[in-house]
Image (tube, grey):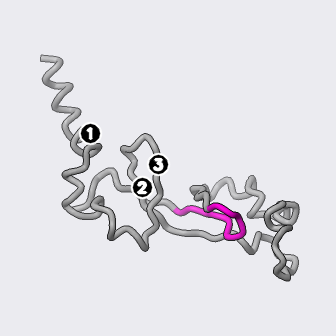
Amino acid sequence: MICPFLKEARVRYCRASSFKKMIPRILEHTELERCSSAAWQQCPVAQQQHEAVVSVPECPFIAESLVQYCSASPATKFIPYSESLLSRCGTDGHRYCELYVAMAHEPEARAAEST
């Protein structure tokens, strides 16, 4: 059994950037992304790359990945699918997670307070 708060998302990140900031992909708003349009050619990070890049409609340095995250956590931490076996969220071990215990018992606490 997996944790009910475990969610999946597609994220994009720049392979040319010095740090890997994962940005959730929202399909209906790709026209607003610099990386998904010809405007990527004005990107300072892409301009610093010394690779020969032909004129393409989308940035060649953009990468996409499937990740998992905890929807109960106030701070979203993306876990790549390749590392999901290291997490207890996909096993019965999620029952020992402090967030899971707090969220799972919250309806019981509210019911006790109202009586």
Reading the image, the residue beneath label 2 is 69
Quadrant of the rendered structure where residue 34 is? Answer: bottom right
Q: Position of residue 22 (x, y in %)?
A: 58, 58
Residue depicted at 20% across the width and 25% down the height: 110
> Is 8 a magenta residue?
no
**Which dot marks residue 103?**
1
Camera-side residue: 88 or 10? 88
In this rendering, which labeled residue sits more in front, label 1 or label 3? 3
Quadrant of the rendered structure where residue 101 is? Answer: top left
Q: Position of residue 71 (x, y in %)?
A: 39, 47
Q: What is the crowding at mark 1: few (fewer than 14 residues within 10 Å), some, or many (at least 20)?
A: few
> Is 14 a magenta residue?
yes
Mark 1 or mark 3, which has the lower sequence index? 3
Q: Are circles 3 and 2 on residues that touch, CB within 8 Å? A: yes
Residue depicted at 49% across the width and 60% down the height: 9
Q: Is residue 71 shown left or right of residue 3?
A: right
